[in-house]
Image (spheres, grey):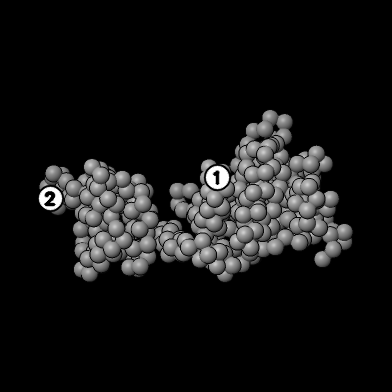
Amino acid sequence: MNASNLTSQQKIELFARLFTGLKNVYGTYDCQSGKVRQAKEPVTEKVIANHLRGKQSYGVYLLVNDRTKAIAADFDTHELQIPIQFIKTAKEYNLPAYIERSKSKGYHVWIFFEDAGVLAAKARLIVNHILTQIGQPDTEVFPKRDFLDDKVLYGNFINAPLFGSSVKDGRTVFVDPKNGYKPYPDQWDFLIGIEKISPDKLDSIIAKLNITSITKTARAQSIISNNKTYYSLPHCARQILAEGVNSYQRLACFHLAISLNKAGLAFDITVAALKAWASKNKPQNGKRIITEQEIISQTRSAYKNNYRSYGCESPAIAPYCDHNCPIYQKNISRYGGNPNE
């Protein structure tokens, strides 16, 4: 495809394929006041056209369920050397990355994936690894989350490039590392040539970095999110999973495994989720964090028998109990008083 032969319609379609995400919402801002807002409207060709003409900006919510077709690191600095260092490090892993000069200051570095997208957890893992490697671990990464759920419906948007008059000012444009990082003279010719990464290639990079444990953890998060399992768990289990514990780790692990088993998760997925949970624990009095073998042992015990109790009366669960919880209320009627006393 030759960029010089592209019609306006083809440019819109090309742009929409690259900078895509949720179709029912987008971000935008007022050019005069700079006020940012969320537009809960369909992302139509008109929205893209208005962005390219500079009439109304388009901010893309990259995360769809647990997948993304692109990821971007947002370097809020005038120092070009930092994003340059990122793309050079990414190149060591045979990972093509592209620098965009943003609308105000700083730079976005984009990585694109094949049309089916990839697990956001995997993409974010690699990008955050590179950012840590170059000494920039606090850099914002879009999407900012691994998955959406019933509580977070949209995530965060990032402003798309090529916004109208900003292009003429040398802003919101991609820059050429082979030409002193000056803007590509033909942005559309550049976009046509973007290399997209396959899921298999992403997995090979993760293996090379020796961080293969992401696969089951991401799968566990995905299953919990997509099947709405997380929000079917009791309040106590949700809070413990989100915050970790500082005491009764093994007992808490046992009761969490029971809850996850009741929610229908397979044994190996529960183990993966509990391994991720363990990293949040902060044991008191110098005690160590629960080990993988202990997690497996507690989970195996929880799955071995058909336990009915969620552990409301357990000292590991009671501090997280919500007295409005229907399980708690049921236990009150059963025991004739506070089930935690």
- Residue 17, quarter of the rendered image: bottom right
Question: What secondary structure is found at the residue carrying circle 1?
Answer: loop
Task: Indicate left or right for 63 with 104 as reference.
Answer: left
Estimate the spatial distance between the alpha carbons at disc 2 and disc 1, rounded to whole Å: 56 Å
| First in sequence: mark 2 vs mark 1 | 1
- Residue 56, quarter of the rendered image: top right
x, y (%) of residue 224? 41, 59
Quadrant assignment for the N terminus? bottom right
- Say which amino acid is labelled 2: Tyr
x, y (%) of residue 116? 61, 66
x, y (%) of residue 174? 74, 49
Q: How many marks?
A: 2
Look at the numbered discs 2 and 1 and tell me whether their residues touch, using CB distance below 8 Å. Answer: no
Q: Nearer the viewer, residue 92 or 28?
A: 92
Q: Which residue is mark 2?
A: 335
Q: Which residue is mark 1?
A: 135
Residue 90 marker: none
Identify the residue at image location x=28%, y=63%.
293
Q: Residues within 10 Å of mark 1 (few under 14, many from 20)?
A: few
Q: Which residue is outermost to the right? A: 4
Quadrant assignment for the C terminus? top left
Q: Nearer the viewer, residue 340 or 104?
A: 104
- Say which amino acid is labelled 1: Gly
Task: Indicate left or right for 127 with 105 as reference.
Answer: left
Task: Indicate left or right for 84 with 140 as reference.
Answer: right
Q: Is residue 111 visible?
A: no
